[in-house]
Image (spheres, rainbow, N blue to C red):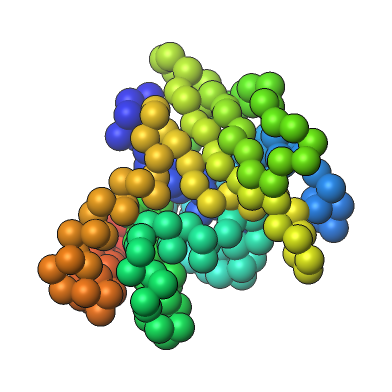
């Protein structure tokens, strides 16, 4: 397992976490238990679905959309990636940014699903207080080669749909949102929020014409 593959697998897994049905009792589920359960379910789902293994974009998008990303605070994730400009964006711009960012992640990383084989996920002991509403769950992906660090930032959300939700992940010391924030900042500084939206849309069109669409 190399750094590039694990980066793709991590982001693909993040998208796939949105596919897994969350039972009603998940609101009371501990964050480390949630990550362990979801990781096992995601790996099992990939192994049992030939279309997902092939990185079939339509299948990936279909399942992500049908589950409405119940385990991910994607609005917070997108806002963090966009940075300060998010607060100045209109509701329509924010919706476009979320849609294009989600499509970018799925289109970019769906091909990594074909490389899932005998990987397992080990969750490290959680360092958190009972009253904490934000935590980091640290895990290792184990398979061929050395174990790979894969950590998740989660927040506990109140009210309807309460429970722990993922809003960032770390692969080998690099946080996914931070990586995109630096890219997006350049686009925003040069062309504004509409320029970033247009750039993401163009990248998604380019990716759609590439190998990720096949399968």
> Residue at 47% across / 25% down in the picture?
149
In which quarter of the view is residue 185 placed? bottom left
Horizontal relation, residue 64 to residue 93: left or right: right
Q: Is residue 190 above or below residue 108?
A: below
| Residue in front for this viewpoint, 101 or 141 | 101
List x then y, in percent, for residue 204.
28, 67
| Residue in front for this viewpoint, 5 or 50 | 5
List x then y, in percent, for residue 39.
62, 38
Q: Is residue 187 above or below residue 193?
A: above
Residue lying at the far top of the rendered structure: 146
Horizontal relation, residue 31 to residue 116: left or right: right
Horizontal relation, residue 87 to residue 49: left or right: left
| Residue in front for this viewpoint, 176 or 12 | 176
Residue lying at the far left of the rendered structure: 190
Q: Is residue 16 above or below residue 199?
A: above
List x then y, in percent, for residue 208.
28, 66
In which quarter of the view is residue 108 placed? bottom left
> Residue at 59% across / 35% down in the picture?
136
In which quarter of the view is residue 101 placed? bottom left
Q: Please indicate, yes or no, whether residue 96 appears anywhere in the rendered image.
A: no
> Residue at 67% across / 26% down in the picture?
127
List x then y, in percent, for residue 207.
25, 62
Q: Please indicate, yes or no, whether residue 126 appears anywhere in the rendered image.
A: yes
* Quadrant for the N terminus in the image: top left
> Residue at 43% across / 46% down in the picture?
11
* Quadrant for the C terminus in the image: bottom left
């Amino acid at each position: 397992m190399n750094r590039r593959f694990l980066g793709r697998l991590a982001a693909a897994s993040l998208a796939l976490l949105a596919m897994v049905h969350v039972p009603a009792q998940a609101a009371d589920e501990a964050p480390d238990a949630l990550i362990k359960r979801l990781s096992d379910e995601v790996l099992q789902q990939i192994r049992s679905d030939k279309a997902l293994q092939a990185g079939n974009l339509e299948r990936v998008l279909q399942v992500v959309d049908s589950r409405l990303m119940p385990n991910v605070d994607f609005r917070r994730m997108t806002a963090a990636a966009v940075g300060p400009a998010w607060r100045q964006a209109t509701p329509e711009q924010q919706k476009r940014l979320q849609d294009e960012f989600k499509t970018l992640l799925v289109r970019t990383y769906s091909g990594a699903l074909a490389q899932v084989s005998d990987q397992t996920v080990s969750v490290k002991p959680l360092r958190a207080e009972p009253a904490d509403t934000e935590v980091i769950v640290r895990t290792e992906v184990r398979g061929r080669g050395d174990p790979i660090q894969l950590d998740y930032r989660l927040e506990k959300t109140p009210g309807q749909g309460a429970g722990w939700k993922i809003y960032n992940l770390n692969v080998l010391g690099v946080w996914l949102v931070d990586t995109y924030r630096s890219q997006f900042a350049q686009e925003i500084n040069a062309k504004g929020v509409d320029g970033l939206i247009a750039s993401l849309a163009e990248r998604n069109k380019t990716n759609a014409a590439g190998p990720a669409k096949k399968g």
